[in-house]
Amino acid sequence: MNWWGKLVGGAFGFMLGGPIGAILGAALGHQFDHGLGGIMKDESFGAGATERIQAVFFTATFSIMGYLAKADGRVSEQEIHVARQIMQQMRLSDEQKKAAMRLFNEGKQADFPFDDVIDQFRQECGRRTNLVQMFLEIMISTAMADGVLDQRERELLYKVSEHLHFPRAIFERLLSMVQGQQHYAGGAQGTTTVTLADAYAVLGIDKNASDGEVKKAYRRLMNQHHPDKLVSKGLPEEMITIAKEKTQEIKSAYEDVKKSRGMR
């Protein structure tokens, strides 16, 4: 039985508490034990930890996605489309889709406890840096769904990254990478023209990087986005398609850069 089956079936050896437990419980119509406080530090890397984090990742992803979508004062059709697109990529069941949309709508509420939710997410993830980075990439994609990243959205993304202890310089590079990835995705769909600058952005390096630095960046990114490794760290199995698409974009960008440089 996967994390979702155990969650709805009440088969977890412990229950989620804290703000994430409250929000997920409301979305599922369950009453979780809030007395546990949401943070089980002794079990952070113990038995069942992966399934617990998968539930936390799912909850934080869709609720904070809704929070960011409302950042510019209104939720655009593009932002709703991104949320539904991610659900489609995840091949969620009807029950899971309903829960995801309820979480998205919770995030849009004026009293959504953003600080508490993102802080609990960080504590639950612990030292799983690659998992946190994947979360940030999804949040950036949501904020940029309408093709524009306004100042309020940028400020909220900074706030998210700061709560997750992501240095500003690394976050800015991540922002550029996601922009490049979106251009690559658009190029594959024929909606945008992909440039070599986009390829460098996807790899998180500039055109003056040495061939050795290009190879190092490629290997690092492929390791960070390896689907099986991310799932083992707590990425919901349903999100493996998203990770696979990102690795394909990274490979495509690397091939473009290699070709432009005559690298073997």
Image (tube, grey):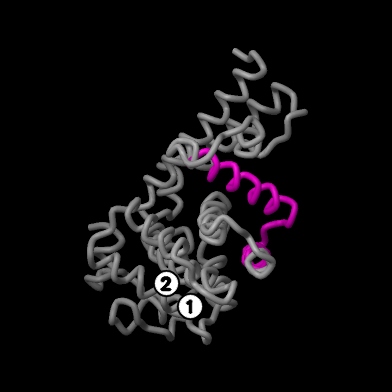
Q: Quadrant of residue 160?
A: bottom right
Q: Which residue is mark 2?
A: 104
Q: Main secondary structure of the magenta part?
A: helix
Q: Residue at x 58, y 24 (%)?
A: 256
**Label pair 1/2, CB-CB below 8 angstroms:** yes
Q: Rounded to the nearest whole Å, what is the CA distance between mark 1 and mark 2?
A: 7 Å
Where is residue 54? Give x, y as percent.
40, 60
Range of the magenta residues? 157-185
Question: Dot 1: within a 10 Å radius of its alpha carbon, few (fewer than 14), some, or many (20 or more) residues?
Answer: many
Where is residue 241? Give x, y as percent.
37, 45
Q: Decide whether residue 117 is among the magenta residues.
A: no
Q: Is residue 49 visible?
A: no
Tag of residue 100: none
Q: Residue at x 55, y 42 (%)?
A: 183
- Give the amino acid type for the residue marked by disc 1 in the picture: Lys
Q: Label 1: state its secondary structure.
A: loop
Q: Is residue 23 above or below residue 173?
A: below
Q: Decide whether residue 158 is among the magenta residues.
A: yes
Q: Label 2: state its secondary structure.
A: helix
Describe residue 32's horizontal placement relative to residue 155 as left or right: left
Q: Which residue is mark 1?
A: 108
- Give the amino acid type for the residue marked by disc 2 in the picture: Phe
Where is residue 139? Give x, y as percent.
54, 60
Q: Residue at x 64, y 51 (%)?
A: 175
Describe residue 10's horizontal placement relative to residue 21 as left or right: left
Describe residue 47's horizontal placement relative to residue 130 as left or right: left
